[in-house]
Amino acid sequence: MSVRPAILDRYYGAIEAALRDALSIETQLGEILRYHIGFADGGAPSSLGKLLRPALVLFIAEGLGGDPDAAMPAAVGLEFVHGFSLIHDDVQDRDEVRRGRPAVWTKWGVPQAINAGDLMQAIAVRQGLEAGPASAAALLAATMEMIEGQSLDLSFEERFVDTEAYLGMVDKKTGALFRCALRLGGLAAEASDEVLDRLDRLGVCIGRAFQIQDDLLGVWGDGDVLGKPTASDIRRRKKAFPVALTHARATTEDRAELERVYAGDAVGADAVEWVVGLMERLGVRGEGEAAVGRYVQEALDLVDAIPLAEDGRDDLKDLIRFLARREK
């Protein structure tokens, strides 16, 4: 099991307190948002997750000589952008479970889930404005790009795409928020345009490595660890990286069968077994792991070009490696 990186623990308590403060809304929607973020009944956090993106904001801000406290509103805003997208994603994908608990829409219904997601997005904008015009603009740009990526991802349900098109979607849906996290930290530290550009490129690499690893877990991950069934992405007919690569590499006969399986209303156990077997025969898992490794190495090289202290570079590299090895 991978050791939890120092970055994730360094700011966890401060981020938790800031999230709780921003969600002190005494309405049913406030209750829903606190539940979704991970605060249960006003007590200890039950399912906050890694708080990866806000931790990156604060780490980069501090590492480049800025004040992490001043960057906190932007960090919280980014976590809320991520949070509202998950509420809406679960509705769109009909995912009933989020982090091992009932998703918001399964607990309160689709209409209230939409309202809760909209409110969380509005709170995110408010947090961004508190951080300043440049941060608010970066947050809104990332939100727009992320939504475009989600729309592309949904459109893939109607067609198969190659890995290049898939990665273009990933750069929006997943990469936009990683780039935003790094840029928000850089803006808080008043970094130069050159450094901001390097942070953007780093965000692309982290986003791709993170998403491809997520896609591999969606096929080969441990269901007990993930909190959802093994091969869940195949059962849901998601055309993620492994499927894009399989479709491209398959014979004409196997490609036609794959298309037939994904055209149905449901993917049964026998079909899931066949798809996974096809992926194994084509070496898809190994190629996916190799792709993660390439993007991780590119990210590590970019870290060396960012003006962080040596221990800061080491901490960031540890985090990048952790994301590529994570099990959930």
Image (spheres, rainbow, N blue to C red):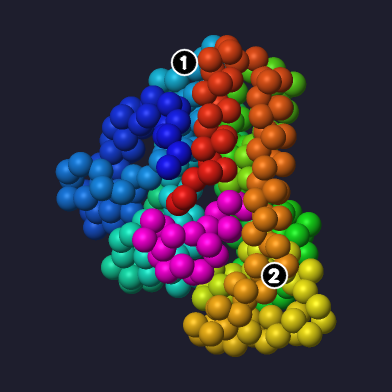
For the point 65% across and 51% down, the residue is 289
Q: Residue furthest front?
A: 281
Across and down, in percent, residue 162 comes to 77, 64
Classify 15 as above or below 259: above
Q: Amino acid at mark 1?
A: Asp
Q: Which residue is mark 2?
A: 281
Look at the picture and state if 206 lies above or below 316: below
**Which residue sits at x=28%, y=35%?**
21
Asked if residue 157 can be seen in this view, the reply is no
> Magenta stretch: residue 161 in it?
no
**Residue at figure coordinates x 52%, y 23% from the top left:** 315
Q: Residue at x 29, y 32 (%)?
A: 17
In this rendering, position of residue 47 left or right of residue 307: left
Q: Residues within 10 Å of mark 1 (few under 14, many from 20)?
A: some
- Among numbered discs 2 and 1, the one appearing first in the sequence: 1
Q: In which image quadrant can residue 112 be found?
A: bottom left
Observer-nearest residue: 271 or 34? 271
- Determine whether the residue tagged by mark 1 lies in a helix, strand or loop: loop
Relative to 312, is 255 above or below?
below
Residue 103 sits in quarter: bottom left
Disc 2 residue type? Arg
Residue range in magenta is 211-232
Q: How many marks?
A: 2
- At label 2, counting other C-alpha atoms closer than 10 Å, the crowd grade (few under 14, some 14-19, many 20 or more) is few
Residue indicated by mark 1: 67
> Is residue 257 found left or right of 120 in the rendered image?
right
At which x and y percent is residue 23?
Answer: 30, 43
The residue sitting at the right extreme is 252
**Mark in front: 2 vs 1:** 2
